[in-house]
Amino acid sequence: MDTSQGAARAAIDPTRFAQLTQQLSLGAVEFKETSGSTNAELADLASRGLAGHLSVYYTEHQQAGKGRLGRAWVTPSGSSITVSVMVAPGASVPTEALSWYTMLAALAWSRAAERVAKVPVRIKWPNDLLAGEFKICGILAQMVPAGSGYGVVVGTGMNVDQSREELPVPTATSLRLASSHAIDRTQLLAEYLKELVNLDRGFRQVSGSVQVPLPGFEGRSLREMASEKLATLGHEVRVEFPDGSTLEATAVQLAPDGALVLEDRNGQRTNVLAGDVHHVRRADGKYA
């Protein structure tokens, strides 16, 4: 049973949000009613030394957001959760492991959405989340200078309350549509950050290793947990490269560097990195 749009679109409550996250040791927390791009604005704060590890920037209405490959991402006010988080783990995590924060964010969102909305959520490599076969969340991570090294601004946009008519493409959905009930966006945002903080803590404790079990996660490594959630594995996919070439093969595993390992019909394997591909789709034409 659907709920009224007015109830579902209650604004995120900053006071209640602060209460729900007070035990998380977040950095600076910035809320704006309207933002051009939370990623761009948080990256600017970080460049000026105003946003350290686990600083959070969120908005009710993003007007000039960008997804992967520069695609526009704009949402109706109050219909989504648009949030960016600065992670600057320092020397505990080597620079080459920072790309895994996309998967940390994906895992954090999947766990939070399943707990709050009771909707099964899986990861579509390299940076989307799915409810069923429909996109429900996109992730954009960008490296930024942080002190003497680098950090990552991880921006996410979770579709929460959009109607079918408000979604930009037929391959998208929202938690409201997937669950048929209203979602408490304040609680959902707090749960996402709780999961992200816990995953980040474990990742730093194992010095950014994706092979070593993360403390507090039942003996599972980051690579193992991400692979369990990866809807792409086991399917024949069509990879489109920027130069126009394509590759069709079966996605068989996630490599330690985050690459998707593909195996063709002759058993030959190819590793593709997220930065090297334009699109990854199911070979049968389905989005997921």
Image (cartoon, helix red, strand yellow):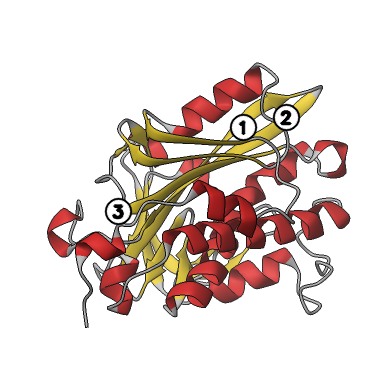
Task: Residue 143: give its label.
Answer: 1
Distance, label 2 to label 3, CA atoms, is 32 Å
Query: In the drawing, does residue 89 fall left or right of residue 15?
Result: right
Q: Earlier in the sequence, mark 1 or mark 3?
A: 3
**283 up-or-down from 148: above or below:** below
User: Among all residues in the image, which is located at the extreme bottom?
Assistant: 1
Q: Indicate the amino acid at tag 1.
A: Met
Q: Indicate the amino acid at tag 2.
A: Tyr
Q: Indicate the amino acid at tag 3.
A: Ser
Label 2: which secondary element = strand
Q: Earlier in the sequence, mark 2 or mark 1?
A: 1
User: Which quadrant of the rendered structure holds the C terminus?
Assistant: bottom left
Task: Residue 150: give its label.
Answer: 2
Asked whether 227 or 57 is in front, the reply is 57
The image position of residue 91, as x and y in percent, is 87, 37
The image position of residue 153, as x and y in percent, is 59, 37
Q: Are marks 2 and 1 in contact (CB under 8 Å)?
A: yes
Image-quadrant location for residue 21: bottom right
The image position of residue 260, as x and y in percent, is 55, 59
**23 up-or-down from 264: above or below:** above
Q: Which residue is mark 3?
A: 79
Query: In the drawing, does residue 246 fall left or right of residue 265?
Result: left
Task: Residue 169: give its label.
Answer: none
Label 3: which secondary element = loop
Question: What is the crowding at mark 3: few (fewer than 14 residues within 10 Å), some, or many (at least 20)?
Answer: many
Asked whether 202 or 232 is in front, the reply is 202
Q: Are marks 2 and 3 in contact (CB under 8 Å)?
A: no
Residue 33 visible in this rendered orientation of the protein = yes
Query: In the drawing, does residue 207 fall left or right of residue 46?
Result: right
Question: What is the crowding at mark 2: few (fewer than 14 residues within 10 Å), some, or many (at least 20)?
Answer: some
Name the residue at 48% across, 27% down: 40
